[in-house]
Amino acid sequence: MDRDTLKLELKRLIVDECDRDIEPSALPDDAPLFGPESALDLDSLDGLQISMALQKRYGIRIADPKQLRRILTSIDALAAYLEAQ
């Protein structure tokens, strides 16, 4: 799978898991997923849902909350982490 396809797949996963009403392709790759600048307005429960969905879909388990927070900073960061695995 190429990187652009992976990023779009991750955007769809996040929008679906967090039940947000936004077109996945409208999310910038480098925009923060959490915090005041985020278009998604995600919180810690959303982070947990995303983590569980990543485990189910890609077979990765991220147990350390600090590591999860670094990985979920943006779509770019998440895609780079998955490609490295």
Image (cartoon, rainbow, N blue to C red):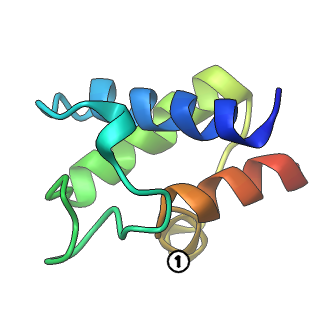
**Residue 38 appears left or right of 41:** right
Q: How many marks?
A: 1
Above or below, 65 relative to 42: below
- Which image quarter: residue 1? top right
Q: Residue at x 60, y 60 (%)?
A: 76
**Residue 8 appears left or right of 46:** right
Q: Position of residue 54 (x, y in %)?
A: 57, 35
Q: Is residue 63 visible?
A: no
Q: Residue at x 26, y 47 (%)?
A: 46
Local crowd at mark 1 within 10 Å, few (<14), some, or many (≥20)?
few
Q: Position of residue 19 (x, y in %)?
A: 17, 28
Inspect the image, locate mark 1, and give the three-letter code of the amino acid beneath it: Lys
- The residue at which mark 1 appears reads as 66
In depth, the one of 47 and 14 nearer the eye is: 14
Above or below, 2 relative to 38: above
Q: Residue at x 60, y 22 (%)?
A: 56
Q: Residue at x 67, y 51 (%)?
A: 79
- Residue most extreme to the right: 84
In depth, the one of 47 and 3 nearer the eye is: 3
**Residue 16 appears left or right of 76:** left
In depth, the one of 20 and 66 nearer the eye is: 20
Above or below, 20 relative to 36: above
Q: The residue tagged with tag 1: helix, strand or loop?
A: helix
Q: Is residue 1 visible?
A: yes
Q: Position of residue 32 (x, y in %)?
A: 36, 70
**Residue 73 appears left or right of 22:** right
